[in-house]
Image: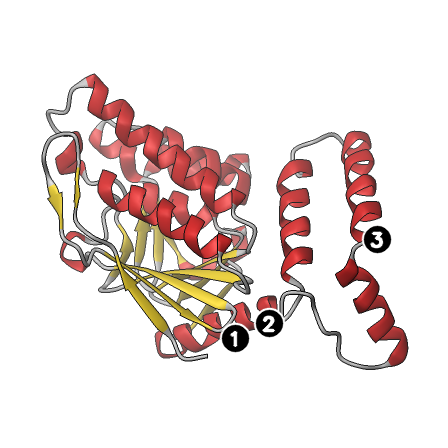
């Protein structure tokens, strides 16, 4: 399938600030959808409008028939420098709450859409940008990529990034990032579990595409079941986790795609999934 591209229209926030129509680009190539942050002059800062459009794009991609993996990428030297501080400077309580509620909704959407979401990180990912990487199911980073939660240095502790980052890297490592604000290089991020792999910048797009296509080769229905079960059980106690996971696996085993996959394995052939 040839790649198809969409551009989102202008969005006016509660203060009348207009975001350019091309701040976000979404494209689809077969079973893989790619959503690209396209505000390099702002280091792809997560403005209120951009977060809302990214949430909409994720939902659109997640609901599109045949899409089995979603990549979040970015243009320019930065993946994302986090929240647009120009929006927060001088903002009243209503707008401040609106910004952070939109951020929470975005991260919940990353978790909630059926296809796995993969971050393709080519530069710095700081604060809410680091949060976005941590929220994704998988992440591939260029060797030059850097990750940080530097809010403590400007008097705004990265409390919401903390939620995702701590779950990805663990308590002590998250606290080091949060309390010092020091950047973590890509190799360290991989060692800590913030990203899955690190590749030369020249190979980043190809490596991410390869990973996305390997993920997307599975049944879309099965990927959705597995992703949801993962997020529902990862923080449970072991006994409750087994109860829920066993129920999910029982229901999964009875589905059309599971029966097709089992049959294909036993018959030594390639499976034909229901959403192909």
Question: Which coloring applies here?
Answer: secondary structure
130 with respect to 196 (left or right): left
Tag of residue 210 = 1
- Residue at image position (40%, 43%) is 131
Helix, strand, or loop for circle 3? loop
N-terminal-most mark, 3 or 1: 1
Helix, strand, or loop for circle 2? helix
Q: Classify 18 as above or below 72.
A: above
Q: Classify 51 as above or below 162.
A: below
Q: Residues within 10 Å of mark 2 (few under 14, many from 20)?
A: few
100 with respect to 66 (left or right): left
Residue 154, how many percent across, how many down?
A: 21, 32
Assign the C terminus to one quadrant of the image.
Answer: bottom right
The residue that mark 2 highlights is 214
Do callouts 2 and 1 mark residues in contact (Cβ within 8 Å)? yes
Residue 243, how many percent across, how many down?
A: 82, 34
On the question of residue 169 being in view, the answer is no
Q: Residues within 10 Å of mark 3 (few under 14, many from 20)?
A: few
Quarter of the image where one finds residue 14: top left
The residue that mark 3 highlights is 254
On the question of residue 11 being in view, the answer is yes
- Residue at image position (50%, 53%) is 63
Question: Alpha-carbon distance for marks 2 and 3?
Answer: 24 Å
Residue occupying the far right of the picture: 266
């Amino acid at each position: 399938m040839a790649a198809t591209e969409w551009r989102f229209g202008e969005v006016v926030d509660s203060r009348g600030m207009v975001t350019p129509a091309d701040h976000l680009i979404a494209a689809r190539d077969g079973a893989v959808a790619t959503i690209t942050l396209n505000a390099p002059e702002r280091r792809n800062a997560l403005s209120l409008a951009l977060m809302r459009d990214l949430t909409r794009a994720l939902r659109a991609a997640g609901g599109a028939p045949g899409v089995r993996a979603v990549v979040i990428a970015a243009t320019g030297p930065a993946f994302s420098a986090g929240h647009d501080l120009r929006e927060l400077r001088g903002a009243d309580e209503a707008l401040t709450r609106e910004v952070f509620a939109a951020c929470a909704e975005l991260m919940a959407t990353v978790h909630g859409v059926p296809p796995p979401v993969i971050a393709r990180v080519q530069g710095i990912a700081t604060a809410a940008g680091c949060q976005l990487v941590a929220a994704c199911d998988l992440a591939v980073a260029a060797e030059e990529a850097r990750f940080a939660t530097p809010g403590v240095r400007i008097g705004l502790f990265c409390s919401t990034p903390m939620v995702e980052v701590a779950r990805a890297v663990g308590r002590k490592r998250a606290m080091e990032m949060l309390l010092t604000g020091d950047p973590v290089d890509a190799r360290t991020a991989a060692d800590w579990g913030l990203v899955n792999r690190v590749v030369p910048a020249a190979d980043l797009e190809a490596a991410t595409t390869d990973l996305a296509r390997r993920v997307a080769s599975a049944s879309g229905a099965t990927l959705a079941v597995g992703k949801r079960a993962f997020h529902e059980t990862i923080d449970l106690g072991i006994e409750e986790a087994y109860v829920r996971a066993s129920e999910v696996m029982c229901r999964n085993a009875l589905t059309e795609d599971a029966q097709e996959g089992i049959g294909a394995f036993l018959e030594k052939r390639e499976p034909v999934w229901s959403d192909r």
